[in-house]
Amino acid sequence: MSVIVQKYGGTSVATTTHIENVARRVIATKQAGHAVIVVVSAMGKETDRLDGLAREVGVNEETFREVDVLMTTGEQVSVALLAMTLINMGHKARSYTGGQVRMLTDSAHTRARLLDIETDRLRSDLKDGVIAVVAGYQGVDTEHNITTLGRGGSDTTAVALACAIGAEECQIYTDVDGVYTADPRVCEDARCLERLTFEEMLELASQGSRVLHTRSVELASKYQMPLRVSSSFRDVPGTLISKEDESMEQAIISGIAFTRDEAKLTVTGVKDVPGIAYRILGPVSDGNIEVDMIVQNTSADQTTDFTFTVQRDDYDRVMDILQKVVDDIEAGEVQGDAKIAKISLVGVGMRSHAGVASKMFKVLSDESINIQMISTSEIKISVVVDEKYLELAVRALHSAFELNEEGA
Ligand code: ADP
Ligand code: ASP
Ligand code: MG
């Protein structure tokens, strides 16, 4: 039995008319001879609306469990409506919440990780010609508490199901034609890519291309599950993300990712002695806060400024933590800037081509954009700039690296 897992995002199920369109696509896949599992997100901006309500009441460590109960209602609505639509169109379908499938996760509410998936019920549905419609983004822990996988997590539900069931391909349908060289909302010239390696997609996703949830790409890469990102509105081939093969041409840069979700903090006048980085970042990590970029240097007077970035949502908490740290380590003061953006160039070809970083810095310098922080990996260069230059920087880099041209 050839199984295809399809995932439809919020815009693709925004109204009951959209849901009918999705149902027709699912039926066409079934009629082409595949067994189908469909994963859906909440309708339109429902998750944002629920998040707004939660914030009005108060979101904190103590309410996280209840926040998950609230947030998962969005997907429960869309699975029910899609299953009903499929049934009314004459097909066998059954909807499932994460708990009903038993998408088992750890207990980290609002950002849980999947541990195991029970597939018996889904397999028997598929055998009986039933289309299984599964709620994205949600699971349960061993105590049956409802959990969520973090915003955008429906992609991860889909890939995890595809891997667990041994699907042929996992198809992610969204509101754009595939993965572009940059977010088409910001860069009009962006070009839809035919293929990408898991590695490149992983960097793009983790550096902020929200077209795919990072964890979904990690899983697809681990289990070598081919991922196709395509449009739910148009018939296009989309972008195939798979392992690197020799026939793939190696673009130096395959895409530009960016994020506005981070904030920068600096502790000034830090003594340049062993253990100081730990004394600053230890309390931050004890608060379960993830740190992204870190910059430290030594100055002539044996003190240094210590700068790092965190998720913008964590900014206030980190500020509080650092105020205490500064007293403990007798440093200068804490400075913060939440209005930053991080821009990253990604491409496997970077491994074998020098000069990408210097070209990037020149392009930004020609636009008089100041670079505040830099970090690199084998296939990525990231810079932090003032948020107000984000669009300008992305467009200038896109054009300088000729990403709008095939084979750039
Ligand atoms: P869904 O609700 O279908 O999951 P998302 O909003 O999560 O959709 O993801 C699709 C959006 O991702 C697109 O509308 C686009 O603006 C954005 N995006 C960011 N970077 C890229 C990229 N490199 N290629 C395509 N889309 C991108
Ligand atoms: N509905 C959730 C969100 O908006 C999960 C998803 O769409 O992937 O984040
Ligand atoms: Mg998404």
Image: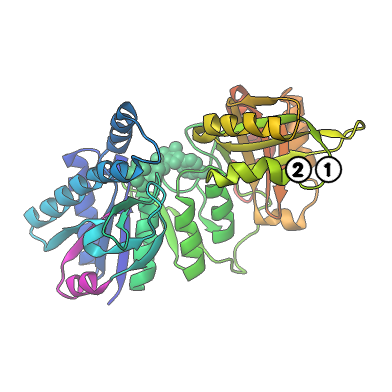
Q: Residue drawn 58% across and 51% down?
A: 203
Q: CA distance from mark 1 to mark 2?
A: 6 Å
Numbered disc 2: secondary structure: helix
Numbered disc 1: secondary structure: loop
Asked whether the viewer can see residue 84, the reply is yes
Q: Is residue 126 magenta?
A: yes
Amino acid residing under circle 1: Val
Amino acid residing under circle 2: Ile
Q: Residue drawn 59% across and 29% down?
A: 319
Image: magenta residue range: 119-137
Neighbor class of circle 2 (other Cα within 10 Å; few <14, some 14-19, many 20+) is: some
Query: Which is nearer the eye, 378 or 30?
Result: 378
Does the residue at mark 1 contact the one at mark 2 (Cβ under 8 Å)? yes
Give the x, y percent position of residue 394.
Answer: 61, 33
Give the x, y percent position of residue 265.
Answer: 65, 31
Seen in the picture, residue 335 relative to 14 is either above or below; the reply is: above
Q: Residue drawn 60% across and 67% down?
A: 247
Give the x, y percent position of residue 312.
Answer: 53, 33
Neighbor class of circle 1 (other Cα within 10 Å; few <14, some 14-19, many 20+) is: few
Give the x, y percent position of residue 264.
Answer: 63, 31
Seen in the picture, residue 142 relative to 338 is either above or below; the reply is: below
Residue with the mark numbered 1: 273
Asked whether the viewer can see residue 236, the reply is no
Q: Is residue 401 left or right of residue 95?
A: right
Residue with the mark numbered 2: 276
Q: Residue drawn 75% across and 26% down?
A: 332
